[in-house]
Image (tube, rainbow, N blue to C red):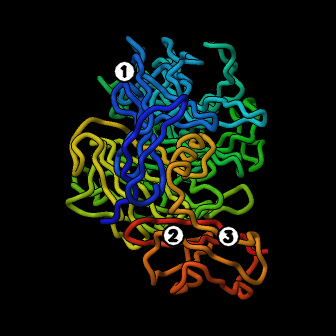
């Protein structure tokens, strides 16, 4: 098993300085465990930590200025379901709370995710998942059973001051219901199976798996935002699906069936995982899904969807989880809905890789996938062949067990929020630098390998989809490569040795 980093740390000013032993970090991870959030390297060494007064609701995210955005659990929440939160904080690198906002009231309760949305001026809005209460009378009026319901709402908050906020956008699942039992109601359709863009309220029985039959019907848990598409993807624990909605709408349009880039208002643009929810043909694919996300632009598999299928061999309690990657069937801003869509790539390790809830996975620049077992503070990085590149448990130092941590968010070495950390590493030791020049290039590139490289070594070239398009066996630390046969675009130069793992972007023009 390859190890990427071993560091001893001490504090200097606002950042950390490290003594490097072998290798260079592939990614850094941000893990929230109980009331502490840790910035960790690939083998679990901690470079900063944020001590908080309350336990985390879910994942924290690192901002470009070195602060974190973190959802936390409030006292006496109105809806006490799994991963309940209610509070959102922004905390700077030095552990100072700069913003503290509550979305917790008798009729609204934040839970699980709160993701940062960067604005043109460099500030961040908070996009959060919450429960929204509807009493039994309102549920009946919508064609449901005589029971209270707490469906999903997604709210975007613009921070103001130290604890204020403006609601700049919102979406409510309750606006997108259908039923085929009561013709007199406004949301009546003769056959709900013909309307997969809507949630069939006829499937709601009053319990939904929530605490004490609380009406936690959907239980959204993981969420991600694509700035390129201006769309949101989220996953549902209890309905066992992932969904995409359009954030380009106004709030008014989001409550309707028209408007936005896709022209469909706040209706579901895409859903996958459980065709039983909308009467489609095809086998159920997801059981207790978490961690839905878009693969970011510039990464291998960009634009594809990823999620964590907790009980992958059906019916729960299987002891087998899997990571699922889906090729996005997008056309413009809309989606073709292949009910029998087959996963593009999966990863599982039956008997050795299982979490019955929480968890998530993210793609890296070099095409690997970092997966977290959120019930145990355990993570591993695997390549597209399923080979384990590293694994680590933050609590015990290996294997499973430990405290819950939802999932880790990962950050590459060039992420601005890590500049102080990475600069400190480079200032200590530059023996692992990989130089490629000129870059961008048209016909030929020069490559200078790190001074510590043991020769010969394989140098690989990948396209943005993760396909290997070239290899070179380097017998010298300085050499040239002809690239005139490569099409214009973005590529990645990858060098792996026993001491380091480096991936650099190459632009062919």
Residues under numbered marks 1 and 3 in contact, where contact means CB atoms less than 8 Å apart: no
Q: Earlier in the sequence, mark 2 or mark 3?
A: 2
**Is residue 45 toward the left or the right of residue 65 in the image?**
left
Q: Earlier in the sequence, mark 1 or mark 3?
A: 1
Please give the residue where the numbered disc 2 appears in the rendered image.
Answer: 451
Residue 465: % across, % down: 59, 71
Is disc 3 surrounded by few (<14), some (14 to 19) or many (20+) residues within 10 Å?
many
Q: Is residue 17 above or below residue 313?
A: above
Q: Is residue 239 visible?
A: no
The tag on residue 80 is 1
Mark 1 residue element: loop
Q: CA distance from mark 2 to mark 3?
A: 21 Å
- Give the camera-side residue of 277 and 445: 445
Image point (31%, 56%), residue name: 391
Q: Earlier in the sequence, mark 1 or mark 2?
A: 1
Please give the residue where the numbered disc 3 appears in the rendered image.
Answer: 506
Q: Is residue 483 visible?
A: yes
Residue 473: % across, % down: 51, 86
Q: Nearer the viewer, mark 1 or mark 3?
A: 3
Residue 252: % across, % down: 75, 30
Picture quadrant of residue 487: bottom right
Image point (34%, 70%), residue name: 387
Mark 2 residue element: loop
Q: CA distance from mark 1 to mark 3?
A: 49 Å
Is disc 2 surrounded by few (<14), some (14 to 19) or many (20+) residues within 10 Å?
few
Is disc 1 surrounded by few (<14), some (14 to 19) or many (20+) residues within 10 Å?
some
Residue 36: % across, % down: 38, 28
Q: Nearer the viewer, mark 2 or mark 3?
A: 2
Q: Is residue 476 above or below residue 403?
A: below
Mark 3 residue element: strand
Image point (47%, 37%), residue name: 220
Q: Quadrant of the N terminus?
A: bottom left
């Amino acid at each position: 098993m390859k190890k990427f980093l071993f560091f001893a740390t001490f504090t200097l000013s606002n950042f950390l300085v490290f003594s490097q032993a072998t290798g260079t970090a592939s990614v850094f991870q941000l893990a929230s465990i109980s009331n502490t959030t840790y910035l960790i390297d690939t083998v679990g060494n901690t470079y900063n930590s944020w001590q908080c007064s309350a336990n985390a609701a879910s994942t924290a995210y690192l901002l470009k200025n070195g602060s974190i955005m973190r959802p936390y659990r409030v006292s006496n929440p109105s809806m006490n379901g799994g991963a309940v939160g209610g509070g959102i904080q922004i905390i700077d690198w030095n552990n100072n709370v700069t913003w503290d906002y509550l979305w917790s009231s008798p009729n609204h309760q934040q839970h699980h995710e709160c993701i940062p949305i960067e604005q043109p001026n460099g500030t961040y809005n908070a996009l959060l998942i919450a429960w929204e209460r509807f009493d039994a009378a309102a549920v009946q009026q919508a064609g449901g059973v005589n029971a209270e319901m707490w469906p999903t709402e997604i709210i975007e908050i613009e921070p103001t001051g130290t604890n204020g906020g403006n609601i700049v956008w919102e979406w409510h699942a309750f606006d997108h219901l259908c039923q085929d039992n009561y013709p007199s109601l406004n949301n009546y359709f003769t056959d709900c199976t013909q309307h997969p863009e809507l949630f069939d309220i006829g499937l709601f029985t009053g319990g939904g798996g929530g605490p004490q039959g609380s009406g936690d019907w959907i239980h959204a848990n993981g969420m991600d935002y694509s700035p390129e598409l201006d769309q949101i993807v989220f996953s549902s624990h209890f309905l066992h699906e992932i969904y995409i909605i359009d954030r380009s709408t106004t709030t008014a349009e989001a409550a309707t069936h028209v408007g936005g880039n896709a022209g469909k208002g706040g209706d579901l643009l895409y859903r996958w995982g459980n065709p039983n929810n909308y009467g489609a043909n095809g086998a159920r694919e997801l059981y207790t899904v978490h961690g839905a996300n878009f693969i970011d632009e510039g990464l291998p598999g960009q634009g594809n969807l990823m999620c964590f299928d907790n009980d992958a061999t059906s019916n729960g309690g299987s002891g087998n989880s899997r990571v699922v990657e889906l090729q996005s069937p997008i056309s413009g801003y809309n989606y073709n809905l292949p009910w029998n869509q087959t996963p593009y790539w999966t990863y599982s390790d039956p008997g050795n890789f299982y979490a019955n809830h929480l968890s998530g996975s993210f793609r890296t620049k070099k095409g690997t996938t970092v997966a977290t077992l959120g019930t145990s503070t355990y993570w591993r990085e695997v390549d597209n062949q399923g080979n384990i590149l590293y694994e680590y448990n933050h609590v015990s130092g290996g294997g499973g067990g430990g405290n819950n941590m939802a999932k880790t968010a990962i950050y590459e070495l060039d992420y601005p929020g890590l500049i102080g950390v990475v600069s400190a590493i480079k200032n200590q030791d530059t023996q692992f630098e990989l130089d490629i020049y000129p870059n961008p290039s048209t016909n030929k590139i020069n490559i200078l390998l790190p001074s510590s490289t043991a020769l010969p070594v394989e140098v690989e070239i990948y396209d943005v989809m993760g396909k290997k398009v070239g290899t070179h066996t380097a017998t010298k630390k300085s050499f040239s490569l002809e690239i005139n046969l490569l099409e214009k675009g973005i590529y990645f130069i990858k060098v792996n040795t026993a001491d380091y793992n480096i991936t650099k972007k190459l632009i062919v023009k």
